[in-house]
Image (tube, rainbow, N blue to C red):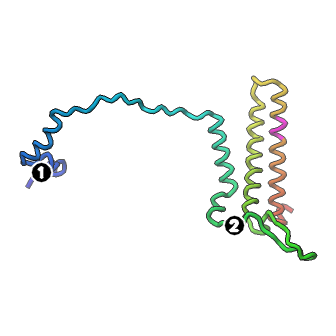
Amino acid sequence: MAPKSETLTSDPATDSIDPILHILRLVPYAFLRPPRLRLKLPSLTLPSPMTTYSLTLLTYFMVVSGIVYDVIVEPPGIGSTQDRATGAVRPVVFLPGRVNGQYIIEGLSSGFMFVLGGTGIVLMDLALDRNRARSVKVSFASAGVSFVVIAYVMSMLFIRIKIPAYLR
């Protein structure tokens, strides 16, 4: 019986006592040489910071808009309800009474409000840069504050439409 170390590392092609197999493995490589290739590796450059920020913001928008939910459940883009007084059918953007359900437009509009608030925070951060002119800093700060306020007020309005008795 052979020791265990020999049985684990043994290769049947190299341990063969067949001389023809040995010749077939060595002869072609005796006079053949691999070519000397001067291949250059492709150089990958990093994306610009603005590209990275844009892709991150787009990914954030898709996640908070509920794209995964929309793909799995396939809800309608917009709903409709019948007016009790006139009998006319009118469109409904928000799915009332269901916190865990949404129409596609509802998710996109809510996601846009979250992105608008995040952009406002970024603009307020840019307003703190000391190397910018005062007028640019004031513009960034005022746009940032207004974006955050609009996003908050609209998000609260969306929640109150979705859940009528929320925080009352």
Give residue 130's quadrant in the image.
Answer: top right
Q: Amino acid at mark 2?
A: Pro
Q: Position of residue 129 (x, y in %)?
A: 75, 27
Q: Position of residue 68 (x, y in %)?
A: 63, 59
Q: Nearer the viewer, mark 2 or mark 1?
A: 2
Q: From the viewer's perspective, tell me whether residue 85 is left or right of residue 112.
A: right
Q: Position of residue 107 (x, y in %)?
A: 73, 58
Give residue 126's quadrant in the image.
Answer: top right
Q: Residue at x 13, y 44 (%)?
A: 24
Q: Residue at x 76, y 30 (%)?
A: 128
Q: From the viewer's perspective, tell me whether residue 122 is left or right of residue 32.
A: right
Dominant secondary-structure state across the stretch colored magenta: helix
Marker disc for residue 3: 1
Count neighbours of disc 1 (C-alpha within 10 A) and say few if under 14, some if 14 to 19, many if 20 or more.
few
Mark 2 element type:
loop
Q: Which residue is mark 2?
A: 75
Marker disc for residue 151: none
Q: Position of residue 141 (x, y in %)?
A: 82, 34
The residue stretch that appears in magenta = 141-145
Q: Residue at x 63, y 34 (%)?
A: 49
Q: Amino acid at mark 1?
A: Pro
Q: From the viewer's perspective, tell me whether residue 100 is left or right of residue 142.
A: left
Q: Is residue 168 magenta?
A: no
Q: How many marks?
A: 2
Q: Earlier in the sequence, mark 2 or mark 1?
A: 1
Count neighbours of disc 2 (C-alpha within 10 A) and say few if under 14, some if 14 to 19, many if 20 or more.
some
Q: CA distance from mark 2 to mark 1?
A: 67 Å
